[in-house]
Amino acid sequence: MTVFDIGSSGKSAETFFNTLKTSGVKKLIDIRLNNTSQLSGFTKKNDFKFFLKEIIDVEYEHILDFAPTKDILDDFKNKKINWQQYENKYIKLLDDRKIKEKYKDYNFNNCCFLCSEVKNTNCHRRLLKEYLFNSNDNKISL
């Protein structure tokens, strides 16, 4: 199984869509808490779904279950918690939401998790992949 991840910030629409197109992604799973952000204008909710389908024939799904809470995000942004504390809180949130059980039959093959961070190093999309798959085989970052 191949599962990708990508951040939308810092990329032009051309680079973003070409990267997805050449990777073989079949479905993009938006894991942002707020999918109406202006950080990358082409990634706004319904417009984004349209662009993905029309430009590169990729399905779109927004799964809020995979997003951190506003409190966790705000605490990290405001430096009330460090990255390790963020990781712990996010993993606990996934456990509390029973993510592994709820999505055990979901077909993630050739899916791509999207958030806004440029790199996945300090990003919940990396944590989500590690949480769901516990395998280096699924750590393909675009």
Image (tube, rainbow, N blue to C red):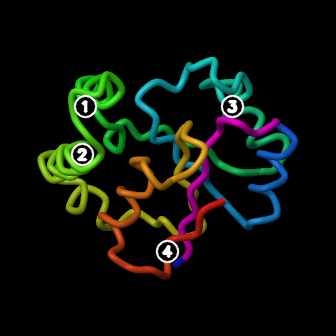
Residue on which the image places disc 2: 90
Which badge, 4 or 3, comes first in the chain's sequence?
A: 3
Give the CA distance from mark 4 to mark 2: 20 Å
Q: Amino acid at mark 3?
A: Phe
Q: Give yes or no for contact between labels 2 and 1 (Cβ–Cβ under 8 Å).
A: yes
Question: The residue tagged with tag 1: helix, strand or loop?
Answer: helix
Which badge, 4 or 2, comes first in the chain's sequence?
A: 2
Image position, residue 71 (x, y; %)? 23, 24
State which region is magenta. Answer: 2-12
Magenta stretch: residue 8 in it?
A: yes
Residue on which the image places disc 4: 138
Q: Nearer the viewer, residue 120 or 70?
A: 120
In the rendered image, the vertical position of residue 18 relative to residue 77, given as above or below: below
- Relative placement, left or right, of 126 versus 49 is left
Q: Amino acid at mark 2?
A: Tyr
* Residue found at x 22% / y 34%: 81
Question: The residue tagged with tag 3: helix, strand or loop?
Answer: helix
In the rendered image, the vertical position of residue 24 relative to residue 118, given as above or below: below
Image position, residue 70 (x, y; %)? 29, 24
Please rate how many residues cluster around mark 3, counting C-alpha atoms within 10 Å: few if below 14, some from 14 to 19, many from 20: some
Give the CA distance from mark 1 to mark 3: 26 Å
Give the CA distance from mark 1 to mark 4: 26 Å
Q: Quadrant location of the C terminus?
A: bottom right
Residue on which the image places disc 3: 48
Magenta stretch: residue 80 in it?
A: no
Question: The residue tagged with tag 2: helix, strand or loop?
Answer: helix
Give the CA distance from mark 4 to mark 3: 25 Å
Label ID, residue 127: none
* Residue found at x 31% / y 41%: 65
